[in-house]
Image (cartoon, grey):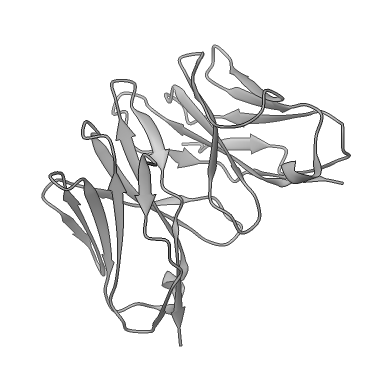
Amino acid sequence: EAGVTQSPTHLIKTRGQQVTLRCSPISGHTSVYWYQQALGLGLQFLLWYDEGEERNRGNFPPRFSGRQFPNYSSELNVNALELEDSALYLCASSGGPLNTEAFFGQGTRLTVV
Amino acid sequence: RKEVEQDPGPFNVPEGATVAFNCTYSNSASQSFFWYRQDCRKEPKLLMSVYSSGNEDGRFTAQLNRASQYISLLIRDSKLSDSATYLCVVITGSARQLTFGSGTQLTVLP
């Protein structure tokens, strides 16, 4: 069974640009979580989608947004990139019939220069 | 108060030592609990679930104390390969939202 897949794996952008990160959950999972992890720091919760709706949002500015599609895949959009947005962006999925633990993708490493 | 709080760490222990991490949660209605392990610059991976009666997996023991609202992870006979960040995860509510702790860094020294 395929795990959580994220694309791209690495990305370099310049300040002010916009970026879209993608996540495909494990088949049958309906929830997708997005986290930001700056180098050496803990996971910072960004967004939670379930059944196509945004269920909760972390303490991030509105230029961080996203959506979940009918097939439960998800996008994270970041507008007006700033240097401090450089981080590993992790997506996790959970849910399905047993609705248990979350599984992470390998992440997208974003560098803003 | 944060929903999920962990020992601040870092923990530096010698090989063979026993080390324990605690994690407290604020919502008494929380239903499920897990420990994850994150290696440097990698994604977190599930280490073990935490069951009400406590559970063991080799050198790792997880416990849940609902009355005091905390979970714990005990690692016996620490190995160098146990060096990682350990995150506790709590699932809460009918929608089953996941909440991660900030993690505790463990370094096992030779």
**Observer-nearest of B44 and B20:** B20
- The residue at the point 29 percent across, 43 percent down is B25
Q: Position of residue B18 (x, y in %)?
A: 28, 77
- The residue at the point 65 percent across, 22 percent down is A65
Give the left or right position of residue A4, taking residue B104 as reference.
right
Give the left or right position of residue A7, taking residue B68 as reference.
right
- The residue at the point 33 percent across, 27 percent down is B96
Residue B40 location, quadrant: bottom right
Q: Position of residue B7 (x, y in %)?
A: 37, 60
Give the left or right position of residue A27, taking residue A41 as reference.
left
Looking at the image, is B60 positioned above or below residue B90?
below
Give the left or right position of residue A52, taking residue A102 as reference.
right
Looking at the image, is A30 positioned above or below residue B44?
above
- The residue at the point 37 percent across, 41 percent down is B1
Count of marks, rendered view? 0
- The residue at the far bottom in this view is B110
Q: Position of residue A79 (x, y in %)?
A: 78, 26
Residue B63 location, quadrant: bottom left
- The residue at the far front in this view is B1
Q: Position of residue A48 (x, y in %)?
A: 50, 26
